[in-house]
């Protein structure tokens, strides 16, 4: 969520406590940031597992990307950078997630829909293309 590498979160999960450990668990990362990232990821992952009938196909492949965008939207609502999220504003963060979690998800999915449109234009995107797009992380630069 915070490191802007959602493709690594999904496809290199075995390396979270291996090669990627030092880039994920930095000195600046605190418990509040970890808990919030997990909560956002759970919202996105639960929707991936049980998508709404109106959800676009990419929702099944993009949970880590959606969680990343949700984190950005949460920080925007708080008007802070990730480093400023601590135990002192944890309650506020929790309230925002409870109140706006669904909106964060939907708005993040719209961001990804637009990024896919920018990348592929109006051509039909196969499920294999979608899977590969999220595996490679092609959209990260388009979600800045």
Image: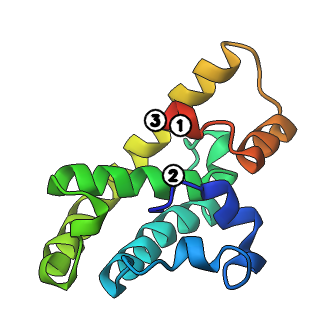
Q: For the point 67% across and 12% down, which residue is it?
A: 122
Between discs 1 and 2, the one toward the N terminus: 2
User: Which residue is labeled 3 in the image?
Assistant: 110
Q: Is residue 107 left or right of residue 87?
A: right
Check disc 1: other Cα within 10 Å, few if <14, some if 14-19, many if 20+: many
Q: For the point 60% across and 21% down, which residue is it?
A: 117
Q: Is residue 105 left or right of residue 130?
A: left
Q: Measured from the top left, where is residue 19 in percent x and y? A: 73, 76
Whether residue 21 is situated above or below residue 116 in the rendered picture: below
Q: Measured from the top left, where is residue 73 in percent x and y? A: 31, 50
Looking at the rendered structure, the number of numbered marks drawn on it comes to 3
Whether residue 133 is situated above or below residue 67 in the rendered picture: above
Marks 1 and 2 in Cβ contact (< 8 Å)? yes
What's the distance in space between the residues labelled 2 and 3, CA to CA? 9 Å
Can residue 51 be seen in this snapshot?
Answer: no
Q: Measured from the top left, where is residue 78 in percent x and y? A: 16, 57
- Residue 112: image tag: 1
User: Which residue is labeled 2 in the image?
Assistant: 66
Can residue 138 be seen in this snapshot?
Answer: yes
Q: For the point 63% across and 51% down, which residue is it?
A: 62
Quadrant of the rendered structure where residue 46 is? bottom right
Q: Residue furthest right?
A: 128
Q: Residue furthest top?
A: 122
Q: Secondary structure at mark 3?
A: helix
- Residue 68: image tag: none
Check disc 2: other Cα within 10 Å, few if <14, some if 14-19, many if 20+: many
């Amino acid at each position: 969520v915070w490191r802007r590498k959602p493709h690594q979160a999904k496809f290199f999960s075995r390396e979270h406590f291996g090669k990627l450990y030092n880039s994920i668990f930095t000195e600046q990362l605190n418990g509040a940031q970890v808990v919030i990232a997990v909560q956002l990821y759970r919202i996105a992952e639960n929707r991936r597992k049980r998508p709404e009938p109106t959800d676009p196909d990419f929702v099944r492949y993009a949970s880590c990307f959606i969680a990343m965008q949700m984190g950005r939207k949460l920080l925007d609502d708080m008007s802070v950078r990730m480093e400023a999220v601590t135990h002192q504003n944890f309650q506020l963060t929790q309230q925002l997630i409870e109140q706006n979690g669904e909106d964060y998800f939907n708005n993040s999915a719209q961001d990804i829909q637009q990024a896919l449109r920018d990348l592929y234009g109006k051509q039909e995107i196969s499920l294999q293309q979608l899977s590969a797009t999220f595996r490679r992380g092609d959209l990260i630069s388009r979600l800045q």
